[in-house]
Structure formats: structure tokens, C-alpha cells
Image (tube, rainbow, N blue to C red):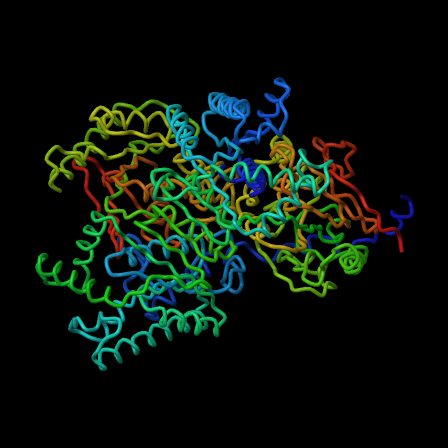
Amino acid sequence: MVGLPARGKSFISQKIRRYLSWLSVPTESFTQSSFRKKRAESLKFMDDELFDPLNEKGKKLRLLSHQDCMGAILNWFSNHQSGVAIYDGANITRDIRKKIKETLSSSDVQTLFLESYCDDESKVRANIQDINQTSPDYMDKTVEYTLADLKKKIRFYDSFYEPMNVEYEGDCTFIKVLNLSSEILINRIESYLQSRIVYYVMNLHVKPRYIWLSRHGESQYNLEGKIGGDADLSERGWKYARRLKDMAEKYIPNHGSLHVWTSTLTRTQQTASFLPYPKKTWKALDELDAGSCDGLTYEEIAERFPEDFKARDDNKFEYRYPGGESYRDVITRLEPIIMELENQENVLVITHQAVLRCIYAYFMNVHQEESPWMSIPLHTLIRLEIRAYDTLVTRIKADIPAVSTYKEKGTSKLGETRDNSKILAGDVISTGKS
Amino acid sequence: MSSDIAEIEEPKISGNYSARTQHRWIPAKEAAEGEAATEASGDGSMAGGSPQKDVDEIHHRISKFHVSPAQMYSTESGRMFHAGAICIVMVGLPARGKTNLSIGLCRYLRWLGVRANLFHFGDYRREQTKQVNSDLYNLKPADEDASGVREKLREVVMGDMINFFKNEGGQVAIFDGVNGLSKERVSLADQMKQQNVRTIFIESQIDDAKLLKSNINDATSSPDYENWDQKTAVEDYAKRIEEVSKFYEPMSEKTFTWIRTQNFGRTMLINQLKHDFLTTKIIFYLINVKIKSGSVYFARCSNNKLRFKSDPALDEKGHSYISKLYNALLSHFKEKGNKQGFPQDLEVWTSTRLRTIQAAEVFREAGLMVKPRPDMTQLNPGAAEGLSEEELKQKYPTDYKQHQLDPYHHRYPRAESYHDLALKLEPLILEAGRVNNDVLIIADETVIRVFYGYLMASSSTDISSMRFPQNEIIEITYNAYANQAHRITIPGVLSD
């Protein structure tokens, strides 16, 4: 990463890490400031001195922490045959970039520089406020303190900042995002994986925002314990659909500009039918296709396809129903949805259990072995708060009873899990019975 | 919870009464019939659709029923990703590879399932005016007649594009022309906006002298210069470039979304990036594209009657096959004028199966770079492995029927479909287009079919039945206008 403080570098680093991991590419992010903090602690060093341009000790400390970070990156590569390591730091001089590139290329690692350049004061200020709320470094500080502190750091770094350009660094592979991606400069992309990263970064925007998720209301098939199909909502499902309208008004702050996405299946469209907002129907949001098991109960599957039933429990992420799909297949077809979600400000996605597990895994960085086992309850509005350093989850329960569609490993019976690791993280809001 | 249980209703009708009625794809049979009907009506298609004639289908108008190799699903409207309709307008002086870029982009978008068509200004011009008049290339011709012709041609292209959006379910129209005046661009974007179509400009600039020279040479093989000698054609073309440059205005419109690619993607600048899936996918393609002049060669490995999971060494028959393949390719390169035989930078790609790695050994010994690619493993036939048509019919009657209807997407139990294979191979296909040198791919027939399907813009309905027999090497040459396939017979090997 390249850029002054408060340019969203950490945000972009974390996003790339999450996205590539979701696609099963080994990825790790290394934050230079954490190495600096460790060094500073052992040397009993104050931040003030560190950002004093005349302080020789500060210069040395910065160099040491850079070396620590590079060492950790090289060590990571020695344990991974392929993958992506992200150096999350300022790297603002041509000299340091040249050194990084040389060191890495002597270890047969390609270097892609990603510069976030921003001279729009209002955007920088907005970003500083976000850092104040979410960064572990500033969470317990006042906005004024954060603002003053970051401004000091920015001023310090700005005194020797050399932005990237084609004239001086035409030989480097780099992508430069100007003013949070309204303009982008791309230079010498040399491999497919690099182009994938560039492609992803183009889809990012740094604004903190909410994404709203919900399963469809309880369906006739849910009542019967059947999977797949294209059934209508049950009576309680309809009740949820009506309640969802009130919940949207009450809990979605700017619901006037809300957009609703559903799948092409009846149950999601019925669930959205009372919502007075613009709607889009996505084929890509359709439930995982259970192929020949579509319309069966788990008991029937266990009976008729015993081998398949077991194979699925053994590796639920890769398992593909005969004539149907696997979770991996769903992730592949969700690509346009994920990119569009990154671009949207205010969306409520009404879709299905397996699809929601995949979307949830993307935003919450859930490992692929665990994500197919997450419990996503019916009749619950899920709020994801996308922030620079993490995503927060809140569940807003409609308090309308519904059957459980959760199936534990090794059984064909349905019932809610008691394993806390499989329950969605975060707070729960209960809307109370009406 | 007891009160909840009381609320559970009895199911209304028993049985599988509300199964999914919508499918991910238009049933292939319907698609094939639809496409055949479109072709029979002579609707813009230039040649018969048989893939075995080795025709690059990129210039065929795309039918409403077309299902592309990497398409994720079909929609009722025929449009994908809620991206709406987009007009891509190429901008640039002659010899900037605009045609090359627009065709490559069209190929990639169609592969993804986007209904895209090409509109080459040059084709319209040739249709209207037989003789080449240099005044026609002047963007602000002094002669009123020439000026009128230009205006009229632009109107015709515009009309065709709008018709494509309105009546043919088109999603992306690619307008390949100079589009060198800001005034023209503004008016075009305005007209498109009235039709609810977004416009994205792609400007190609080249300042690398070598690249420019090779582009000019390419351009003189265009239909404009049929029966010209090379030298006069180059001179004439240089004059044309000069003529156009007089009034050419590079993209600088602040409010438009435009992408400037310099020296074919080496450096790219994007203005007013619209954050949506399709726009970023277009840029993704432009990052990956290179001017590709070489060829890709495909050859089979000797024995594909093996079980999917078995991985034996190359047997004697295989060794003899490989040496024949080696010699056939060697003499092909010699005939092409390479005195030393293989070009030194020829890359050989194989799967990671032992037999293909061993097959490539002889090329490694000849000093060539050999790259085993894990993703190039053949299609996994799953439970259908080793079964004859009759046995399949008996053992899996339902699957067999479905397979006949849609052999591209259907999977036998635990098998992969061609569609799966296509998604897996996309990075390699793009990479083969990125490397500057020739590539020899030694692979199973299933893998060759998918590669071929991309490079020749085939419909998914044709791919699974294409034939690439063992006694042939298939050479596909990248060309600015249409890729060319050519089959080289390996002497002394029988077809299988």
C-alpha cells in the first residue's frame, strides 16, 4: 500500500484480504504500525518523537519497523507456495518502494503497489471520523484528539511524500486510486491475479454504510421440512412479510432511498411484496440448486441417497447435489452480487439460507469449512455495518415464530443449533410481539 | 414454544407441488432450435454455423437464444447483471488497435453471456462507397459531399445500434470507429441517453513506435487494401493517419465515463468510473488484453481411454505418438520460415498428469519452456466414466435424457460439466492471450473444446460435440479482425 494517513489504506487492505480468502486464495495483511508499536514499546518511545522530522531516533525506529514488516512478509511467503501478502503501510518515498520491489523480486515475489491518493479535504475529514470510531488506535480518544493527531502525522509524511506516477516509476506495477476511486490509473499489470485485485479495488468505495439481509418468510416447504422448490409463503411467512414493512420503516434510517433485491423464486418476492421501494430480481440470488434432491426432506435424502447424504456432511462446501450446485458453485455465481453490493449505499437483500451464508461469509470473513454450517434464522432482519476495520452484525427479530431449517452435521433432523460458534455474531434486537 | 407449535398449519397439498419451474438456462434444445431458425432466416449471419468449418463466429449477429460458454444463467429479458444497456464507443487515430480491442472485448463479453454486437464504421463505409477517397478520412472535410457522407454513415450506424438495443434484446453495442471529434461524441452520448443507454468511451493511444509499426502493417491487410502492394498500402495508410490527426481531439470530457488505454493496457487511466459490475468487468478485460500476434497450438495427448483418477506414465505407444507430433510441429515451423525449427520463446502448457508432463519432456529437451497447469485437467466424467451410450441409457435413464438435451451444462453424478470446465479455464484462456509468444497446449479433447470455444466465439450448444482428433494439431492464429483456425495433420497417426 502507498499513501498518506487517513486515505483508507487499512480499509482497502482488509477488504482485499477478505475477498481473496473468500475465493480461497491464501492472503494475509501485515500492518506496519503494529510492528512500530512493538518496537516503540520495547524502546519506551513516544509517538510525538516518532513524527518529528528532526528526530534521528524516530527515523531509525521507522526503518526497524519496516524491516520487521518485510521480514514477516518474506517469512509468510516461505510458508506459502502461492498467495497474496499485503503490506499495509505508508511507503511514501520512491526509494523505499524501490527497495521493497527489489527485496521481493529476489524472492520471486511480484510486487503490486496500490496507492490511495486523495486531495479532497472533505473526504479525508470523513475518513478521519471513521478512523476515530473504528480504529483500535483511536477508539477511546475524542474526535478532536484524533483529528489533531492524524493531521500532525499527515503533515509529517506529506513533507517527503512522492506520489507514484508513470514518469518516475513506469517500470513498476501499480494502481493509483484518486479521490476514492472516481479516477484510477493503472500501470503494467502483469498477471491474472493482479488483474483480479485491480478489478476488485475498482469496485470498492470507502464509505461506511449498512447492508440489510433477510431470508424469505417461512414457506410451505419449510413447514414440511423440504428443501429447494418454489413454494408459497406459509401464513406466518406472510405475517413476516407484512411486519418487514414496519421493521424497515423503524430500523432502516434512510429507508426512503432503500433498494430491495430478491431472487427469482416466489417466496422472496412474496416476502418483499409489501415493501414500497424499488425492487430488482436477481437470478444469481436463487437458492442453491439441490438438483435431484429438490423437494425432498433430509430424511428422504438420507434414505434415497445415503452416499450423497454422507458425502455432503463430510464436505459441505464442495459437495454438489446430483444435477445441482455446491456452495463453491454459489460463490462463483454470486460474484456480480458481491461487486454490486460493494457499490451500493442502501440495499435490503431478501434471499435464501445458503446464499445468505455465502454473503455473510464474505462480509464476516468466515472460513469456507464453517460457512455452510452457519445458522441463519428465519424472520430476522440482519444488519451489517460495513466499517473500515471490521463489520458489525445486528439481528432484529420480528418475533414471529417459524420452524427451524437448521440441520446439524450427522443427522437428518431439523432443529436450532446449540453451538454458539454457528450462531451469527453481534447484538440482538427484539421487536416484541404485537 | 408450545403455543408456536399450535400455529403450524397442515400442508395444503401433499407431494412435490411447488417444485422449481424456472431453470438456470434456457433448455438447450430450445436454444439450438431458436438459433438454427435465426440463422436460416439469414438474420445477419455471415456463414453457416457449423463449428467444424473452423469459422470465428465473432462477427455473426448474436441470436436471442444464444447461450454462451461461461454464462451463469439465462434471464427472461436476455440482459444480465442489471447493468442496463451500454454503448461502448471506441476512440482513437487509425492503427491504434481499436478494431482489435473491440473484437476482443466483444468476445469476452459474449463469453460471459452478455449479448454484445460489433458495429465497425469501416464496414459501413465500404458498403456505401466503393472507392477510397482520402477526403473521407478528414474529420472536418472541406468538401461538403464528403461531409454529408460522413454524417449519413454515422446516422446509419446509430440507427442500427438503437435497433439492436430496442428490437434484438441487445445489451452492449460496440461502435468501432475514430470518433475523434468531441462534438460527435457529445451528440452520440446524448442520443443514447434518450434511449436509456449509457455510453462508455474507450480511447486507445499508442506512442510505442514498434507497436505502431506492427499495427500499420496489420491494417494494410484489411479489406480496404485488397490487391495493393504492401509498400503503397503502407504509404497510403500513413497518409490516412495524417489526415485524421489534423482535427483529432483526444478524450478530455470531464463528465463522461472514459477509459484511456496507452500502448494496449500498459497504462490505463479511468475517468468518472461508474461503479457497477459490467463496467468494471470491461476494464478488467482491458487490463488483460495484449496485442496478440502469435498462435496457440492444440494437440491431444496420446491416450484418453484412461480412467479419470488413474495417472500412469506415458506408454510406448504414447512415446511414439509424441515423437510424431513433435516432428509434425517442427516441420510446420520450418515451413513457416523458422530455420531453427521451434521459435525459442514457444511455451508448452500441459496438465499436471504424469503422461502429459512426460509427453512435454521432448520439448523441454529442445530448450523450450514447459509449464504444467493444474487447472488444465480434463473434464471429470464422474459416474459416466467408461460407460458406453447403451450402458448410460440403462444405468442412468433420466440423466441420459437430460444429457442429450443439454450436454454442455448437464453433469452425470459426481461429474463436471463443460460449463464448470469453462469457468475453471478462464484465467488460462486470458493468460494465453497475454503472453506475447506462441503457446502449445497439450491437453485432453474436453479442454481443447473449451479453449476453441472461446477463441472462435462458439455457442455453448456446439462445444460438446466438436471434434479434435488425435492425428491433428489445431493452430489458432490471433488476428485483428477474426481468429483463424487451421488443422495440421500428423503423418503416421490414425484419427480416433
The residue under the point 35% across, 25% down is: B354
Q: Residue furthest front?
A: A54
The residue under the point 78% across, 43% down is: A404
Q: Residue furthest right?
A: B3
Q: Nearer the viewer, residue B188 or B411?
A: B188
Against A29, residue B168 (above or below) is below
Q: How many marks?
A: 0
Q: Nearer the viewer, residue A395 or A411?
A: A395
Q: Please indicate, yes or no, whether residue A19 appears anywhere in the rendered image.
A: no
Against B97, residue B146 (above or below) is below
Against B104, residue B352 (above or below) is above
Is residue A179 toward the left or the right of residue B236 in the image? Answer: right
Is residue A382 toward the left or the right of residue A84 in the image? Answer: right
Q: Please indicate, yes or no, whether residue B124 appears anywhere in the rendered image.
A: yes
The residue under the point 60% across, 34% down is: A368
Q: Quadrant of residue B440?
A: top left
In the rendering, at what x and y percent does residue A339 appear? Answer: 55, 50
In the rendering, at what x and y percent does residue B479 appear? Answer: 25, 52
Q: Nearer the viewer, residue B195 or B75?
A: B195
In the rendering, at what x and y percent does residue A260 appear? Answer: 66, 59
Q: Quadrant of residue A55?
A: top right
Q: Quadrant of the C terminus of chain A?
A: bottom right
In the rendering, at what x and y percent does residue A310 appear? Answer: 64, 32
Against B125, residue B461 (above or below) is above
